[in-house]
Amino acid sequence: MHRTHTCGQIDESLIDQGVVVAGWVVAMRELGALTFVVIRDRYGSVQVVFEREKPNIAHGYVIKVEGKVRMRPSNQFREDWRSGKVEVVVESYEVLNSADPLPFQPEDEVKASEEARLKFRPLDLRRPKMQENIRIRHEITLFIRNYLSRKGFLELETPILTKSTPEGARDFIVPSRLQPGNFYALPQSPQLYKQVLMVAGFDRYFQIARCFRDEDLRADRQPEFTQLDLEMSFVSDPEDVLVLIEELIAEIFNRWANAGVSVPFPRYTYKEVMERFGSDKPDLRYSIEYEDWTERLAGLGNRIIDSNVERGAKVKALVLPVTLSRGQVDRLQKEFQFLWFKVSEGRASGNLARFIRGWNLSPYENKTVFVFVGRGRSFLESLGEFRHTVAKGFLKPEKDWAFLWVKDFPLFYWNKEEGRVEPAHHIFTSPYEEHLPLVEELESSIEREEDPQRIEELTLSILGQQYDLVINGVEIGSGSIRVHQADLQRRLLRLIGLSDDEIEDRFGFLLNSFRMGAPPHGGIALGLDRIVAMCRKEESIREVILFPKTTTGVALFEGAPSPVDPKQLEELGIRVLTK
């Protein structure tokens, strides 16, 4: 062995003992005839002292040192190191490997650009913060495996090379050499497989699953990512899944983020969060919410409000507990359309001030009130964008953590531009049994080509047994009670415009499985990358993934994607067409 101890094991208990340590040189300084060198491995750092010779080493070298442990002068203690009160006096050393001049120093306060960090990723991963991020990821993953195993779940692996099925994003496709002209797809999720596993009788399944989606990227999105994926048989109520998952999540965030969260998490319906917060993933660290002021403001003489209310619009008000300047309001109006007033020293100002004469203004003292008029889902979503903007811009979070469930989403949305029904989540979500007559009515309305407005009303009335876990305004996971009856599944697939031939081609294996006897089942998928990032207080999931891609999908370290040998393309029967 090249070492008797790791750098993180050297402490006062080893005084006067001989040790052999090895690691990377991260700091050097000379003081007269002495050379002080800090070496580091993933367990910690230790200072070694060369008294007999000047070592021929540099930053980034990998060295092995043999020597004795002694106390450091008390004024040189490093309280942030386990070895901070001791040092190793070098008796001999060996350079295990040299290093070229480093593009940047692997320290937490790195000054390199993210592009440089990703290009030289092994060096970036050597930083203590990154080492800790990856170590915590391992601990959380191990905890999940042990927790679910104790609950009777089996960890099962589903295929990576699979069939292309529409699941809301573009597939990555893989050509088959043995079946020319045919392609595999990389799984966007194990959704269909895990449902088939319930038919197979495995009862409780989980997987730390790799998922692949060819979609536009951002800080919390990667073309390949990791989910905690699980499914349970003989569940008929979302609460069966919610209780299991919130206990797991609370334990993770209490252990690794000191969140102090308790269960149960609050439950909200989709309709409730959209009306109150304008978002299906509201950040409840901020308590501001929308109030319905339709009756309060209609008929006061404001033409914008009155004309829109006559056409069925709602009036929504958001009270911001801050008095904004006119300049701040003007900047907001460049992006959002609203009416407003503020109250200072008992007097109202703003373009709504003259319409509220006679009101008791004391509840709005030193506050700014924003009023919006509109209707429909897009209107509510715009309210959510505004709430997010003013909360981030003018308020401080009232607490560190806000966990909640959002449930009872519409099963469908009406796509006005394309004139068709689309799944709001995924088409394998089961509607509530009491809403099945509405499904039949929607089928009839589409068949008769009724008024699109009536079809849109029906789509919003049919609720699916779906649930999302939201933490601090971020959707961490999504799941549902699934359809487990072949006939109902076929009807739902037809509603989104698939023909019987298309259904058979894409989902025939699933429907055939259901006909073998499918138990009621449900599950959820949670973003493991995002969970770890939030526990580590990282804004981007790239900080907790070993070799992430850039926002353009490029792997800078290994240089992918890249051209392939023309012979490979010829074997696959593929010709590259340039635009």
Image (cartoon, rainbow, N blue to C red):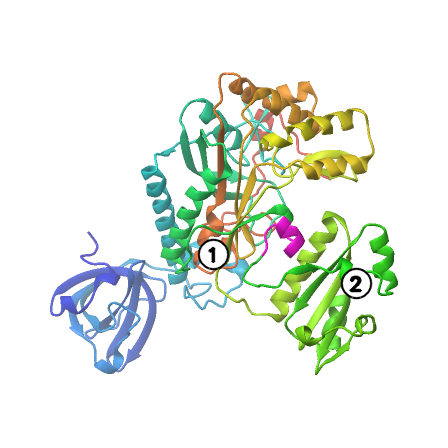
Q: Is residue 201 visible?
A: yes
Residue 13 x/y as whole percent:
14, 67
Residue closer to the observer: 390 or 93: 390
Instruction: Give left or right: position of 147 versus 518.
Output: left
Which is more foreground, mark 2 or mark 1?
A: 2
Q: Which mark is residue 534?
A: 1
Q: Secondary structure at mark 2?
A: helix
- Specify the segment rendered in magenta: 272-282
Q: Residue at x 42, y 42 (%)?
A: 244
Residue 58 % position (x, y): 34, 67
Left or right, 572 with respect to 237, comes to: right
Numbered label attached to residue 18:
none
Count the marks: how many? 2
- Earlier residue among tags 2 and 1: 2
In the rendered image of this protein, does residue 170 appear above or below residue 373? above
Going 24% across and 68% down the picture, which residue do you hit? 83
* Residue kind at label 1, given as amino acid type: Met
Q: Residue 253 occupies which quadrant of the picture?
A: bottom left
